[in-house]
Image: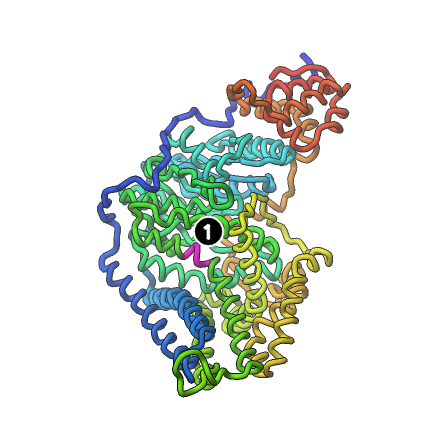
Amino acid sequence: MDALRQRPTAFESGFAPLPPECPLEMPEQSLWEQRDRPPRPDTAPRGVVLRRLFVFGGAIALTCGAAYEMYEVLQVGGLTPLEAAILVLFVLLFAWIALSFVSMLVGFGLSLVGGDRPLGIDPRAPLPVLSTRTALLLPTYNEDPHRVMARMQAIYESVRDTGRIAHFDCFILSDTTDPAIWVAEEAAYLKLREAFGGERVYYRHRSKNTARKAGNISEWVTRFGGAYDHMLVLDADSLMDGDTIVRLAAGLEQHPRVGLIQTLPVLLNGNTLFARVQQFAGRVYGPLIARGIAWWHGAESNYWGHNAIIRVAAFASQAGLPLLKGGKPFGGHILSHDFVEAALMRRAGWGIHMAPQLGGSFEECPPTLTDYAMRDRRWCQGNLQHLKVLPARGLNWVSRLHLLVGIGSYITAPLWLLFLLIGILISLQAQFIRPEYFPAGASLFPQWPAQDPIRAAYVFAGTMAMLVLPKALGYLAMLPRGPGRRGIGGVIRGALSVIAEIVISALIAPVMMLMQVRAVTEIFMGRDSGWSAQRRDDGSLTTAELMRQYAFPTVLGLLLAAGAYAVSTPLLLWMSPVVAGLILAIPVAAMTSGARIGRGLRRLGLLLTPEERSAPAVLVRANALASEGPAVGNGDPLTLLARDASLRAVHFAMLGSPPRRRKGDVDVQLAVARAKIEDADDLDEVIGLLDQKEVFAVLANADALARVLHKSPGGKVEA
């Protein structure tokens, strides 16, 4: 027996990386086919119409009041075209703020009375008995395999500790394109299976990641979905407590017409100042907003793409996404698939719910503003794509609202910038342009820009109060509960943390606005965002990177400051929050991207969250496993396969049969790789000749890989 086959492989011991296939059809849905109106879900809360009237009525009332006050500010001497434009922009932007503000007030009220429990799921009740099967799906794309497997192991063990593990299987669904990471994933998976005794944990890699994450999930559904009642979809940075997972599965069991239950993921593991600010804000303010929107969403809630449980039959029958007509960035595969999948399931009568009361649901935040902007650029394109989905037939009006909110979250950035620039133009006009005493048409008086400065100050103060008050309410909601109060560092440190979050977020906001304006502009100009892996480690930026990415905001801030000062000192003071954030873009980005300041504040008890003071068991376990460091999978992928028989057996078995090739279809990377392999004398020379894409093509082809391994020490290998 040759050197490549000197010990029994995992497969020779009865090991299998995937269960038997149980296909389930997932037909592509039409967005334009006429649909009958579905019945109202029986899980819709009583009085949901009144709830929505209260929320929207309150938001409309606030907007009308603010619009009237702003009109009174501007109409002195009559509205000029610029003043009319700024009034329209103000109303649109204020309405956006008002809806969120009223939802936050509802959430604060619910927190005072003990909260609402959608679907009757009570996290304090005894753990229910299950009778269904659920698959835990963890899609991954070029992520650190060791950390991915550490999270999956922690989740598996947490579910096992509930005594309900017999009802759950785990799947790592890889779309990885980096060949070294691909083989490292397989090695880490083997180690994970050894830890579990080879039970209930499976791994699958797609060589072509068609339709990205949505395609990854749908491919699993069509191959294995028939064997499961539910699937719980995770992200590569997701972490969930076993108690929460069991209660979610029981929720779908108890409510047969519910198609999806979305949890509220809490941010954790942040070390950089940027991540810690996002983490603190999400933990302190986020639950109030989530409770508020869950209260009026009812059975027409939304899906955020992860940390949610889904009824497989409902998803398969209704959530097959169509290709959008036209080219990228608006056409093709739907990027922000989650909103659309929820809307299509609700269109068929399935209830879509949110359960923010559950807890035990976590994720991580990008470590820097730069990383956040990269992810946000992809989300921006996906949400703007929804402009083509918005007119689809049969959608519930709340589902359309979710799509509009996603679109608006990016369209508002250009509107804010336009609002700011028009305000400057009005000030310049009043300062430097003589009034027109003889305008076109009959007029007894000249028309010039004139505003009521006292009323303007009140409007500004009221708007700022609506932005800041939710943060104060989030802080107050933490105080009555002992664990919550201690979790944010106590009354004094908690208050200081809120102030710090407000200041840092205010400095970051103008730069984020410009980044979103750029993203929106590029998308409308036809530029595709692509799909890059997200960095999750701490990472400071070099001076060259800081200058390249943040020089433009700095220069723009200096120009705006100079222009405002040329008009008047009061205008400069009014613009100071925006100007300061832009001018300080480089030092703020540098300060927030490193972990030193973030960890220092944590030691001082600032920007703390309850999960840091009293970490859940699943988080402690995941971090402990991750801290052990990768014990497998380091090095060149071809060398690893040549040396490890078990790893090689897993890899060959998961390749399966190659797809049928049509005449004329040529895989260029594979063809070039084959030629280079024939020219090489040994494995080391092959490795030196092949580039990364060619190595990936070889790893995805059993025959080519066997030819490579034939050149390794010891001779030949059986594919």
Expressed as whole percent of the image width and height from the top left, the position of residue 695 reads 66, 29
- Whether residue 322 is in magenta: the answer is no
User: Residue shown at 26%/52% (left/top)?
Assistant: 44
Q: Quadrant of residue 96?
A: bottom left
Q: Is residue 64 above or below residue 256?
A: below
Q: Amino acid at mark 1?
A: Leu
Q: Nearer the viewer, residue 65 or 198?
A: 65
Expressed as whole percent of the image width and height from the top left, the position of residue 595 reads 65, 58
Q: Nearer the viewer, residue 654 or 164?
A: 654
Name the side, left or right, on which 408 lies relative to 714.
Answer: left
User: Residue shown at 57%/48% (left/top)?
Assistant: 623
Name the side, left or right, on which 526 lies relative to 35.
Answer: right
Numbered label tally: 1
Q: Quadrant of residue 79?
A: bottom left
Disc 1 is placed on an element classified as helix
Q: Residues within 10 Å of mark 1 (few under 14, many from 20)?
A: many
User: Residue shown at 37%/50% (left/top)?
Assistant: 390
- The answer to whether residue 127 of the structure is visible from this angle is no
- The answer to whether residue 25 of the structure is visible from this angle is yes
* Residue range (magenta): 405-409
User: Residue shown at 50%/66% (left/top)?
Assistant: 416
Name the side, left or right, on which 23 lies relative to 140.
Answer: left
Q: Is residue 716 above or below residue 556?
A: above
Name the side, left or right, on which 507 lies relative to 234.
Answer: right
Q: Is residue 685 above or below residue 257?
A: above
Q: Is residue 596 above or below residue 94?
A: above
Expressed as whole percent of the image width and height from the top left, the position of residue 353 reads 33, 50
* Residue identified by numbered label 1: 384
Expressed as whole percent of the image width and height from the top left, the position of residue 95 reads 39, 67
Q: Nearer the viewer, residue 558 or 597?
A: 558
**Dominant secondary structure of the magenta stretch?**
helix
Q: Quadrant of the N terminus?
A: top right
